């Protein structure tokens, strides 16, 4: 829900928003690239001025430039997020100083959320229905029912 919150906030600021779905080699994902993209499509289908796009094995600034985008929006929950995002922003600026990064904080009810926390709660049978979309909650239930 934190990602959706930041996307919806972005739609109030920008004329067009692209949601970039990618693979992060530093993260262990529970769902495939295609499944994650479909979750966004299911939740945001029909939203005007929004396009869900995917990319792999490319720098984000190169991808943004190819789309004609000059602003990257990143969600920041805590100081620990900011430190990582600050370094990433400075590197992106070195790679393409025509692209700016804007940080948005999620609503308070989502500020503690992380995918690893949600996965842990779901894997132990906890209720995550207020933390993720209906489709994601259903997929988590199916995934963890298979692994037990």
Image (cartoon, rainbow, N blue to C red):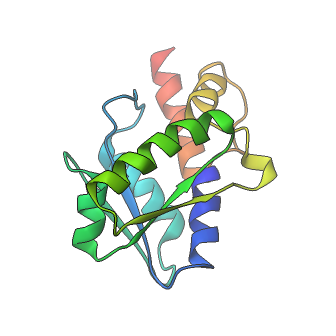
Query: Visible in this render: residue 62?
Result: yes
Quadrant position of residue 124: top right
Could you tell whether 45 is left or right of 123 in the image? left
Q: Nearer the viewer, residue 33 or 25?
A: 25
47 horizontally vs 56: left or right: right
Q: Position of residue 64 (x, y in %)?
A: 30, 66
Residue depicted at x 61% and y 69%: 8
**Residue extending farthest top:** 148
How many marks overall?
Answer: 0
Instruction: Examine the rendering and report whether any part of residue 1 can be seen.
Output: no
Q: Position of residue 119 (x, y in %)?
A: 57, 28
Q: Which x, y percent locates residue 41?
A: 43, 64
Q: Give percent across and percent down for residue 113.
A: 67, 39
Q: Is residue 128 left or right of residue 60?
A: right
62, above or below 48, in the image: above
- Residue drawn where x is 69% and y is 54% of the image: 106
Residue at point 80% right, 51% down? 108
From what the image shows, is residue 103 above or below residue 77?
below
Relative to 93, residue 51 above or below: below
Q: Residue furthest right?
A: 108
Q: Position of 71 compared to 111: left or right?
A: left
- The residue drawn where x is 36% and y is 46% is 91
């Amino acid at each position: 829900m934190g990602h959706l919150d930041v996307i919806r906030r972005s739609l109030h600021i920008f004329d067009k928003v692209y949601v970039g779905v990618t693979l992060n080699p530093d993260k262990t994902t529970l769902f495939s690239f295609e499944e994650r993209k479909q979750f966004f499509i299911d939740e945001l289908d029909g939203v005007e001025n929004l396009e869900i796009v995917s990319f792999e094995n490319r720098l984000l600034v190169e991808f943004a430039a190819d789309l004609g985008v000059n602003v990257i929006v990143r969600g920041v929950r805590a100081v620990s997020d900011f430190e990582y995002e600050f370094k990433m922003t400075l590197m992106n600026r070195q790679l393409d100083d025509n692209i700016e990064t804007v940080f948005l904080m999620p609503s308070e009810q989502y500020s503690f959320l992380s995918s690893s926390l949600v996965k842990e709660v779901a894997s132990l049978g906890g209720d995550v229905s207020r933390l993720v979309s209906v489709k994601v909650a259903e997929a988590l239930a199916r995934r963890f029912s298979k692994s037990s």
